Amino acid sequence: MAKSRSSFICQNCGSITTRWIGKCEGCSEWNTIVEEVAEATTHKGLGPKAKGGRALELTDLKGKDHKILPRLISGIGEFDRVTGGGLVPGSALLIGGDPGIGKSTLLLQVVCALGNRNARCIYVSGEEAIDQVRLRASRLGLSDAKIELASATNVRDIAATMETEDVQLIVIDSIQTMYIDTVDASPGTVTQVRTAAQELVRIGKKNGIIVVFVGHVTKDGQIAGPRVLEHLVDTVLYFEGDRSHQFRILRAVKNRFGATDEIGVFEMVNEGLAEVANPSALFLAQRQSNVAGSSVLAALEGTRPVLVEVQALVAPSPLGTPRRAVIGYDSGRLSMILAVLEARCGLQMGMNDIYLNIAGGIRISEPAADMAVAAAILSAWNGTPLPADMVFFGEVGLAGEIRQVSQPDLRLKEAAKLGFKRACLPTRKNKKEKIDPLQANEIDHLQTLIDRMIDRQAVRAAAE
């Protein structure tokens, strides 16, 4: 009989140690090490006593019985866009987000939309009773949708249902509440989460069932549990947004069947989540013209161009160490841009408090936002409003040069569609087409942008 063995596993990062320690050596978190007991295997390795395997059945790329399964399209355009055009049969999808951000609401709307398209869907809740799910569906006006509900946490029961029922999609809300009774560990631990997800994904791929997991997140915004959970699934989506704003961003960080970094924009209303077909117009709806410190960034999220407002405020600091407050942008890149402005362009900003905000609750991480951020900071520092009909994009290098970014013509088309007349962008080597009536102001160094802004201020002062 095999003897049981115990191991100590970090519930934050999944690191394994031979003894209990107060601070995890993998993620440096305190009091996250938990002892878990597992049954030892009877044979070690693949020695002569191990059971022999079967030879693999090999095939070519085309295959004799190869067929392309149609995707399940929900009809919710923003969700279908992020998933790559719909859900692939037999795939596994993981969606994570902060508590109360709207994960369960979004998935309930998706399964109800699929159910109304004659797809058999099951919604399994491990956190709520069936009556609570019905109450949410009633609030969203989805009580007549053709879906089936269940409240369960035992993976064995869920697996039996997937094996016996002819189902196309099943939602597990959430994976941290599921458990397998053969594993001696509490629900939500690393071992339970990994084992339960492996079993459900295996059955889903075997029977061509789409499995959608809801995952909790840690205080750092990462999906709780081992990283292997994200490797097990085909698609990982993050539902982002500030709960003080009405906008929600669904972002694909991994997708085996579509583009990564694709986003879908939703607006939280009384009836649930409403998709936003034109997020650029919505993000710029409350922008005030003739205000110093405001610039418009032509960003690219996945394959979608998005125009957002970058706001900056520069004020003298009464403290010895000036503040750098950033919302929606990387604080490290802001420090780099400020260093370039001081070291390469001769501007003295070291004794000023600098505040930067990406309006609308969206987070921008691409390097193309550098020039829009620099323009907003220069405008706030100079007290000179930027032209209201101009957009900015371009990467700033450490030498102050403006580097090219991907898909400039796509960004210019989106700006022209929204009525912008001018664009400040890096010098293009290959100009595919001229975007009329958009005037492209191409610059190759940050100093050029500063000279033009100072010249404009001098002209206005002379005119007054």
Image (cartoon, helix red, strand yellow):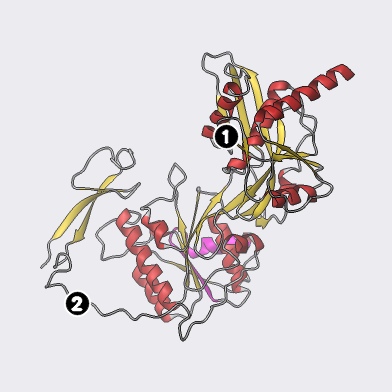
Q: Does the magenta stretch include residue 460?
A: no
Q: Residue at the spot x=31%, y=50% of the render?
A: 14
Comparing marks 2 and 1, which lies closer to the viewer?
A: 1
Residue 366, by quadrant, is top right
Tell me if mark 2 has few (under 14), some (14-19) or many (20+) residues whose alpha carbon lies within 10 angstroms of its own. Answer: few
User: Residue 179 versus residue 421: which sits nearer the camera?
Assistant: 421
Q: In which quarter of the image is the N terminus?
A: bottom left
Q: Residue furthest right?
A: 463
Q: Compare residues 75 and 130 and report the one nearer the observer.
A: 75
Checking the image for residue 52, the label placed there is 2
Q: Residue 397 carries which label?
A: 1
Q: Which residue is drawn at 15% across and 72% down?
A: 50
Would residue 231 be visible to someone looking at this image? Answer: yes
Comparing 61 with 366, the one in front is 61
Q: Is 132 one of the magenta-colored residues?
A: yes
Amino acid under label 1? Gly
Answer with left or right where residue 455 lies relative to residue 69.
right
Dot 1 falls on a residue whose secondary structure is: loop
Measure the alpha-carbon separation of dots 2 and 1.
Answer: 58 Å
Magenta region: which residues?
120-138
Numbered disc 2: secondary structure: loop
